[in-house]
Each structure stands twice: as C-alpha cells, then as structure tokens.
Amino acid sequence: MDIQWPKKQRDLHNHHFDSTVWDDVSFRDDDIVISTYAKAGTTWTQQIVSQLIFNGEEGLEVAEMSPWVDLRVPPKEVKLPPLEAQKHRRFMKTHLPVDALVFSPKARYLYIGRDGRDVVWSMYNHHVNANEKWYGALNETPGRVGPPIERPPADVRQYFVDWLDKDGHPFWPFWDNARSWWAIRDLPNVKFIHFECLKRDMPGEIRGIAEFLGIPIDESKWDTILEHCSFDYMKQHATKSVPLGGAFWDAGAQVFINKGVNGRWRDVLSDEDSRRYENMAVEELGPDCARWFKTGEGI
C-alpha cells in the first residue's frame, strides 16, 4: 500500500514554540515521539516509555533524556547535540499539530488525548503555580515571537472560558492539534492512548504500548515497572521527570505532577458551560473524534 506520509506545512512560533527545531533532527529507525496537546499525560507516558526501554531501572533522569523538541528554550544549538549523542533508544516529546511537525516514517508516534476540560484544569494548576523564572525564560529569552504569556486570572472558570473563546489561550490552539492527529490515527506508526484508559487499566495500556514499540516485557521486572509508573511513585520522584527538577514552580516538582484526577471541572462549570464545550467539540472535531477525546472510546 502506498502510504501518504504527512508533510510539514507551516511553522509555529510563540512564547513556547519554535517548531523549526524539528527541521534539524536526524531521525533514527527506532525513535519514539510522544505527543499531546498538553497536560494530557505527556510526563506519565514519558515515564512509561523510559521504564520499558530501561527495564524498570530506578532513578532515570527522564526530563533530561526526553526533551521537548519544539520548546524554544534552550535554542536548538544547545538542545540538539545532547539528543544526537544519545546511545539509547531515543524518546522525544512534542506539543505540535501534525502539519507543523517534521513527521518521519522511521519513528513511532504515541498520541495521548484527554477531555479538554480536564486539560484546562491541569493547565491552570501548571500556570497559576509558575514562578518568575518560568515567566523570565518564556518572555525574556531572545527569539520570542508574538506577545508574552501573562499571569492567569484568579478564577479557574474564567480561565476555561478564555481558553474556549480564544481556542487554547494563553497557550496554543486545541482544535487544530486534535484534528491533525485524529486524521492520521490509522497510520501504522501511530498509536492513540487516552488518559482515562491509562487511569482505568494502566497495566493493559502499558502492555499495548510495549507491543506497539516492539519492546519485549521482562516479566521478572513487571511489578517494578508498574510501581515506577504509578502516580504515587512519580509524585515522590518528580524532580527526575519534571523540567529543571521543578525550578519553574516555587512549590517544587510535585506541583507539576498535580492530582492526575479527571472531572474536577464538574464542581465549577455550569451545565451550560459543559454543553457549550461539548457542542463546540462536535462542531470542530466531528462526533467520533469528539467522543474519543471525551471518553477514549471509539478507536
């Protein structure tokens, strides 16, 4: 079958993004790319992949080993040489939509989805706890394109309304990301994972990921792998998996790995708010895609 592989169509730049970094990545046959819109289980999936690659090893510096390639800080000349020097199977992350990404047939892509309302609640925790170092890195490092990222409002509902009204504000568009990945879900080197499914059956999901990546599971290490991928373990060892060991949050790395709980928005959003989100999701994504992002079902 003649596969039509995605082609990069544009670049994205803002306070976080420099999508051109991907232009200079030299792909290897066994590369792994972990993708989400954001706050949908990226760090969790990086931990899972690291445990599969390194067979349950303790103390892995996952944040250093698995860079966010399209983050503009540090610049590509600083970020890419250590990535090129890695000898182990590489696993990188992205928050780009497919049409702004250099997509390689050599790589294996894991896309993690989550209900947009849960994404916003996790994003708010991430944003409201960020310190001056975070704002300085994003806003004051040379090369930023567009306006700076500003402090969030005190009201999380207002944060959600702004995110919905301005499609992903103040980070980046949600619907484009969701649509672009949904469109390539049937490619042989793409696997979809849903946050809710990971919560419900982490062992089964990890086995599915291992099979997709072609990594045989050492059953003698299985219990250790599961322990190291648990929320409690990641919370206790957050400095290993959070960028710069959590230096961008005064409360430390643990605040980055917050609660891992879905549905917190139910106590804040009105029925009308939720209906508006769900109706917009169907309008923007179509019913099948909207259903998958809400529940993880239908793929």
Image (spheres, rainbow, N blue to C red):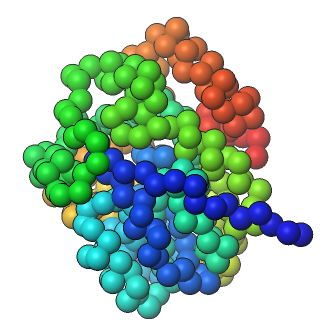
Residue at image location 44% in from the left, 21% down from the top: 165
Q: Which of the image's four quarters has the N terminus? A: bottom right
Across and down, in percent, residue 73 comes to 26, 62
**Corner quadrant of residue 157:** top left
Residue at image location 54% in from the left, 50% down from the top: 97
**Corner quadrant of residue 209:** bottom right
Left or right, residue 1 beside residue 206: right
Across and down, in percent, residue 239 comes to 24, 64
Left or right, residue 126 beside residue 11: left
User: Which one is nearer the viewer's eye here, 195 or 173?
Assistant: 173
Left or right, residue 147 beside residue 27: left
User: Which one is nearer the viewer's eye here, 240 or 96?
Assistant: 96
Residue 195 visible in image: no
Report the number of numbered marks. 0
Across and down, in percent, residue 178 comes to 59, 42
Residue 161 visible in image: yes
Vertical side of 179 occupied by 265: above or below: above
Residue at image location 23% in from the left, 57% down from the top: 143
Residue at image location 67% in from the left, 60% down from the top: 6
Across and down, in percent, residue 131 comes to 13, 45
Vertical side of 51 occupied by 279: above or below: above
Vertical side of 243 occupied by 79: above or below: below
Vertical side of 211 occupied by 195: above or below: above
User: Which one is nearer the viewer's eye here, 110 or 252?
Assistant: 110
